[in-house]
Image (cartoon, rainbow, N blue to C red):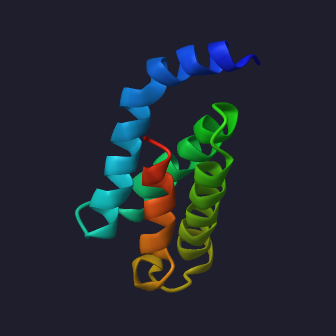
Amino acid sequence: MTEERIAVLWERFRGTTTRRVETLEAWYVGELDHRTALADAHKLTGTLGTLGRPDGSLAAAQLEQMLRAHLEDAQGDPRRDPSVPQLLDRIRACLA
């Protein structure tokens, strides 16, 4: 994909991407459930990767993996993991 085309797509999906990041932030402070956060982390992984933001995609994938482990294997609450704020920061940085 050309840089111009990626820029056009980024503008098209910026609002949706921003809302998904806001969903993850709401989950982190306890306002939303893990399943909602998992769905948006998964979508962000793909969207950010496709739109040329690999660091955000990787951070979203790491968060997605933590959420999936919690839901499928009853591992501890991912919100207690000290790396979550940094992952959210990396994802948020992709919006700039």
Image coordinates for residue 34, horizontal then vertical, percent: 42, 64
Residue pictured at 46% horizontal, 17% vertical: 12
87, above or below 41, in the image: below
Residue pictured at 32% horizontal, 59% vertical: 25
Horizontal placement of 93 versus 66: left or right?
Answer: left
69, above or below 5, in the image: below
Image coordinates for residue 41, horizontal then vertical, percent: 52, 52
Image coordinates for residue 46, horizontal then vertical, percent: 65, 40
53, above or below 56, in the image: above
Horizontal placement of 12 versus 30: left or right?
Answer: right
Image coordinates for residue 93, horizontal then vertical, percent: 46, 51
Horizontal placement of 27 versus 60: left or right?
Answer: left
Total numbered labels: 0
Residue nearer the viewer, 30 or 94 = 94
- In this view, the residue farthest toward the left is 31
Residue pictured at 40% horizontal, 52% vertical: 36
- In this view, the residue farthest toward the right is 1
Quarter containing the N terminus: top right
Quarter containing the C terminus: top left
